[in-house]
Image (tube, rainbow, N blue to C red):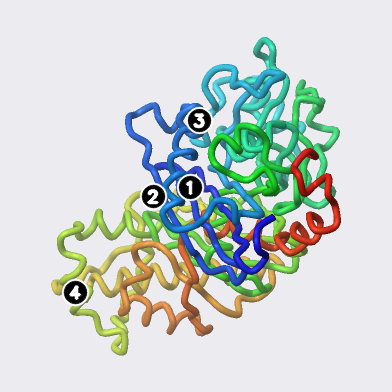
Amino acid sequence: MPDPWHAVALGIDIGTSGVRVAAIDRNGNPVGMAGRRFVGALAATDPATWWQLVGEAIAALRETISLHDIVSIGVDGTSGTVLAVDANGQPLGAPSMYRDVVHDPALHTRLDEIAPPESAARGASSPLGRAIVLARGADVATILHQADWIAGRLRGVFDATDANNALKTGGDPDRLCWPDWIERLGLDRRLLPRIHAPGAPLGFVGDDGVALGLPRTARVHAGTTDGCASFLATGADQPGDAVTALGSTLVVKLLSAVRVDAPQYGIYSHRIDDHYLVGGASNTGGEVLLGLFGADRLAALSAALHPDRPSGLDYYPLLHPGERFPISDPALPPRLEPRPTDDALFFQGVLEGIATIEAAGYARLGDLGATPLRSLRSVGGGATNHAWTAIRQQRLNVPFLPSRSADACVGVAGLALRQADRTIETRAHDPVAANGSTR
């Protein structure tokens, strides 16, 4: 049994570009990290490659930690990636990736007719719709999400999912079950794994996990999606805490004591302990900046910003007509006029416009019943622009806090860490669990 003072939790992130793993100590501080990137166009869609890179990344951790100190393991995966497996957990063909769509108009129609209006399982790329298609194949025993399958390989048992990954597949995050209406769509609920709360203990490491060097006494916990894990990594953990991702698009996420579902804005609620993670994504963001100014000019234009002297420009920066959140209007036109001759002033006006949209996004969540914004953390490329941060602070008027980490693997490790003390206590009082013979 590992020394409790040296016990660590392991987080495994299966992302869009590769696999990253993190080991964190009892205080939540990273003590080891490693990663491997997908190489080749098909690598990200190959479960065998997922598992191979998990093994390589875990092996790399040996340089900084003892794998025998690992007591808890959590896995996150891309939201909406599903695959069919046989009775032994072997994948049956290629997975259906998060970006894939269902090419079955009749199924689309039935989804719209049967799924509740507030369900996150609706839409052209619905994971539920794609799971229904996968279930039509031969020898299908279970439909799993990406994180479920990796956790299943670690345990040797393929029977569990978490409420966050299950949400877009139709799962009920409050009752932790698959609703009756799913069967009306032709999907036998016995083909779906049991839903657990994110972080719930599932069982101990099995033979495949031991082959990676993991201790048989480490416990595997229910995981989460990559987006939820990234939020948790920042340290945001109280209602009113929010995280803005300033990437190619503008994504706002807020921890709320109240569940909010507003599909017209692309808003739905992930369950995190006794709270809900709600948010929305605007079409504005870094892609607009690159389209208007080009990557090579951003640094020089940022140096010329004057956050203390507002431009007075009133922009809604979009590259093309159409907005999802905080305004739901597929025809909303960009507003980028009048354009001053000074590009630095124009640039500042665009950043102010994006900041105004960010503030309107959090206001929208509050109007829909979410806990009011009380603090903000930022991730993504735009988070390092200090002048833009000053502009955003003026519009949001809440404390801006540092992010503990931006790595999803750290967030899902923290989710598993919450059960570490209980795990150690269980091993100390249960000799059967201590020798790893129980799943």
- Image coordinates of residue 351 in percent, x first then y, are 33, 71
Mark 1 highlights which residue?
A: 330
**Discs 4/1, front:** 4
Q: Nearer the viewer, residue 152 or 310?
A: 152
Q: Earlier in the sequence, mark 4 or mark 1?
A: 1
**Looking at the picture, does residue 48 appear above or below residue 305?**
above
Q: Secondary structure at mark 4?
A: helix
280 left or right of 2? left
Q: Which one is closest to the eye, mark 3 or mark 4? A: 3
Instruction: Residue type at mark 2: give it.
Output: Pro
Residue shown at the point (29%, 88%) measured from the top left: 309
Q: Secondary structure at mark 3?
A: loop
Q: Which residue is mark 3?
A: 100
Image marks 1 and 2: residues in contact by CB distance under 8 Å: yes
Crowding near the residue tagged with mark 4, few <14, some 14–19, many ≥20 C-alpha atoms within 10 Å: some
Which residue does the numbered mark 4 point to in the structure image?
A: 344
